[in-house]
C-alpha cells in the first residue's frame, strides 16, 4: 500500500511520492528558545519524530531539518531581564530542549540550524524579493514583504485576502503599506544589545521570523522539498509567508506536502500562557515517566486535538503497562518484521494512511492479546518490533513495571558503573540501553572529562 498523507495545501489525503526517488527531505518549524519547552512543543516534536521513523521504516532515506529560532523579540527581552547575553540564554535553552527531547525518545534531526547562523542567506533572499518587486523599504527603516503582490497568497489557509486581513493579530506598524505585509528585515533599536543586530545592505537590524525558515529550508534542503511541517497555529501567518517568500523568489513550489499537527487542549481549552493552563515538559515529567508521555501523545492522531489531563496520562500509563506486562510474561525474541504477518500488515496499512497511530496502537493491543494466549516468543518479538516503529516498548519490561519507585543515588551510581563497564567492553548496545533506562526515569547522564555525572529532570 502506498503511503498517503493529508496535505493541508490541497485539503486532501494524497499519495506521497518523493521528489527524489528513495529520499525524503522534510523541514519542521522548531522552537523559539527563550524558555523551557512546553507540552505543545512535545506534541509537535513527537508527531514528526513518528513521521520520520515511519519513513525510514518504509525504506526511505530521510533528511530531516528542525530549526531553532534563536533571535526574536521575546529572546531579547528575556536576556535583558535575566542580565545575560542572548547567546548564553539560547545556548542554555537549547541544552534544555535536547534534554527534554532525549527523555521523550525523540531522535535528533539530521540538521538543527540556528537562525543566527543563516543571516547572510536571509539577506540574499530579501534582495531577490526586492529585485522582483515583492519587497519594499518602509518609512520606518524596516524591509517588508508585499503580500498582495504574490498571486497565491492565502492558498495555504484557503481564505480570501480580506478575511486574512481582518484576522491579522498583529497591529499595523507605521511603515507597512498593508496589514498583511510582514517584516523581512527589522531595523534595530539603539537600546538593543549586542547579538541582536547585524549590519547589512538594509542597515543595522535583524531578520524577521518568517524569512528565517525560508532561508534555512532552502539552504539545507533546496528550493523545493517534500514535506514542510509544524503546529496548526503556524499555518497562518508563518507558513503562508514562507510560501510567498520562497515561491516568490524562486518560482517553484516550496513543499509538495504541508503537514500540521493539532493543538493541545487542557480540559478542552487550548493550552496557552494567557489562560494559565501551561505546562512545561519538565513539569509533566516530574509526575509521569517519559514513555507514558510519549505513548499518551502518539496514540492520538497527529491532526486531532490532544486533551491533556492527569486522568488521561494515568490511563496511558495503565495501557502501556499492559503491553509491558505481556513482554514481561513472554520474553520477546529478536525478529525482523515480516510485513506479510496479518498483525504487521494491518499495522503497516494504518501507518500508511496518514500515519494512523490510533489504529496502529490498536493492532499492538490485539497482538498482545494473542501473545498472552499463545505464549509465542516470536509474536512477542513482533510486538516489540512494531512498537519500536513508534519509539515504544524498547526498554526492559521490569524497569518500566517497577518505575513507580524512586531510584536512590546508590542504584543510579551502580547503573552508571555498569554502563562504563559496558563501554569499556565495547558493548555499546548495552551502554545505550542503560542510558535509555535512566532517561525514561527522568535521570539525565552527562559524560565529561572527569567521568559521568547525572541530574534529574525537574
Image (cartoon, rainbow, N blue to C red):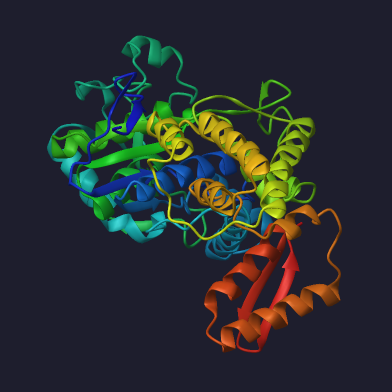
Query: In the figure, 260 relative to 430: above or below?
Result: above
Q: Quadrant of residue 267?
A: top right
| Residue drawn at 65 percent across, 70 percent down | 434
Q: Residue at x 53, y 44 (%)?
A: 46
- Name the residue rendered at 48%, 62% in the picture: 194
Task: Using residue 398 as the reference point, say whether residue 231 is left or right of it.
Answer: left
Quarter of the view holding residue 39 = top right
In-front residue for pair 425/274: 425
Residue 256 in the image, given as x and y percentages of width and height: 25, 34
Query: With respect to residue 323, does 265 lie above or below?
Result: above
Could you tell me residue 201's position as x and y percent? 24, 53
Asked if residue 231 lies left or right of residue 20, the reply is right
Residue 52 appearing in the image: yes
Seen in the image, is 177 located left or right of residue 368?
left
Residue 79 lies in quadrant: bottom right
Q: Position of residue 113 (x, y in %)?
A: 39, 57
Q: Farthest residue in the front direction?
A: 374
For the C terminus, give its image quadrant.
bottom right
Q: Is residue 240 above or below residue 399?
A: above
- Answer whether residue 142 is visible to the viewer in this image: no
Position of 29 with respect to 118 (left or right) is: right
* Quadrant holding the N terminus: top left
Residue 248 or residue 377, whichever sits in front: 377
Q: Nearer the viewer, residue 348 or 404?
A: 348
In this rendering, the count of numbered labels is 0
x and y percentages locating residue 335 in the rendered image: 48, 57
Establish if 90 lies above or below 348.
below
Amino acid at each position: 500500500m502506498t503511503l498517503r498523507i493529508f496535505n493541508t495545501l490541497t485539503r486532501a489525503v494524497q499519495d506521497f511520492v518523493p521528489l527524489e526517488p528513495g529520499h525524503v527531505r522534510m523541514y519542521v518549524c522548531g522552537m523559539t528558545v527563550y524558555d523551557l519547552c512546553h507540552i505543545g512543543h512535545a506534541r509537535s516534536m513527537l508527531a514528526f519524530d513518528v513521521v520520520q521513523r515511519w519513513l525510514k521504516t518504509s525504506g526511505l532515506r530521510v533528511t530531516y531539518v528542525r530549526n531553532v529560532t534563536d533571535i526574536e523579540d521575546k529572546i531579547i527581552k528575556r536576556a535583558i531581564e535575566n542580565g545575560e547575553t542572548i547567546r548564553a540564554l539560547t545556548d542554555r535553552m537549547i541544552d534544555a530542549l535536547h534534554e527534554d527531547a532525549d527523555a521523550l525518545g525523540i531522535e535528533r534531526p539530521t540538521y538543527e540550524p540556528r537562525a543566527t547562523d543563516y543571516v547572510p542567506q536571509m539577506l540574499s533572499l530579501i534582495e531577490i524579493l526586492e529585485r522582483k518587486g515583492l519587497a519594499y523599504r518602509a518609512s520606518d527603516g524596516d524591509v517588508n514583504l508585499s503580500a498582495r503582490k504574490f498571486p497565491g497568497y492565502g492558498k495555504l489557509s484557503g481564505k480570501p485576502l480580506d478575511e486574512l486581513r481582518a484576522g491579522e493579530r498583529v497591529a499595523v506598524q507605521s511603515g507597512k503599506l498593508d496589514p498583511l505585509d510582514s517584516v523581512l528585515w527589522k531595523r534595530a533599536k539603539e537600546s538593543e544589545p549586542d547579538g541582536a543586530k547585524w549590519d547589512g545592505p538594509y542597515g543595522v537590524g535583524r531578520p524577521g521570523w518568517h524569512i528565517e525558515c525560508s532561508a534555512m529550508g532552502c539552504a539545507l534542503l533546496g528550493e523545493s522539498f517534500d514535506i514542510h511541517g509544524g503546529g496548526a497555529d503556524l499555518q497562518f501567518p508563518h507558513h503562508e509567508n514562507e510560501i510567498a517568500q520562497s515561491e516568490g523568489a524562486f518560482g517553484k513550489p516550496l513543499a509538495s506536502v504541508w503537514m500540521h499537527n493539532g493543538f493541545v487542549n487542557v480540559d478542552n481549552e487550548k493550552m496557552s500562557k494567557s489562560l494559565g493552563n501551561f505546562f512545561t515538559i519538565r513539569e509533566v515529567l516530574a509526575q509521569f515517566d517519559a514513555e507514558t508521555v510519549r505513548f499518551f501523545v502518539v496514540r492520538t492522531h497527529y491532526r486531532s486535538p490532544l486533551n491533556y489531563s492527569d486522568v488521561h496520562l494515568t490511563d496511558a500509563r495503565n495501557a502501556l503497562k499492559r503491553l509491558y506486562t505481556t513482554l514481561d510474561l513472554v520474553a520477546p525474541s529478536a525478529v525482523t518484521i515480516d510485513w506479510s504477518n496479518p498483525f504487521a500488515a494491518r499495522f503497516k496499512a494504518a501507518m500508511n494512511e496518514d500515519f494512523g497511530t490510533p489504529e496502529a496502537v490498536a493492532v499492538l493491543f490485539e497482538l498482545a492479546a494473542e501473545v498472552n494466549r499463545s505464549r509465542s516468543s516470536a509474536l512477542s518479538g513482533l510486538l516489540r518490533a512494531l512498537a519500536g516503529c513508534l519509539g515504544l516498548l524498547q526498554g526492559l519490561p521490569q524497569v518500566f513495571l517497577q518505575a513507580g519507585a524512586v531510584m536512590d543515588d546508590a542504584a543510579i551510581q551502580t547503573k552508571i558503573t555498569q554502563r562504563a563497564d559496558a563501554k569499556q567492553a565495547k558493548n555499546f548496545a548495552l551502554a545505550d540501553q542503560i542510558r535509555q533506562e535512566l532517561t525514561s526515569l527522568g535521570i539525565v547522564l552527562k559524560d565529561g572529562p572527569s567521568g559521568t555525572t547525572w541530574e534529574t529532570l525537574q
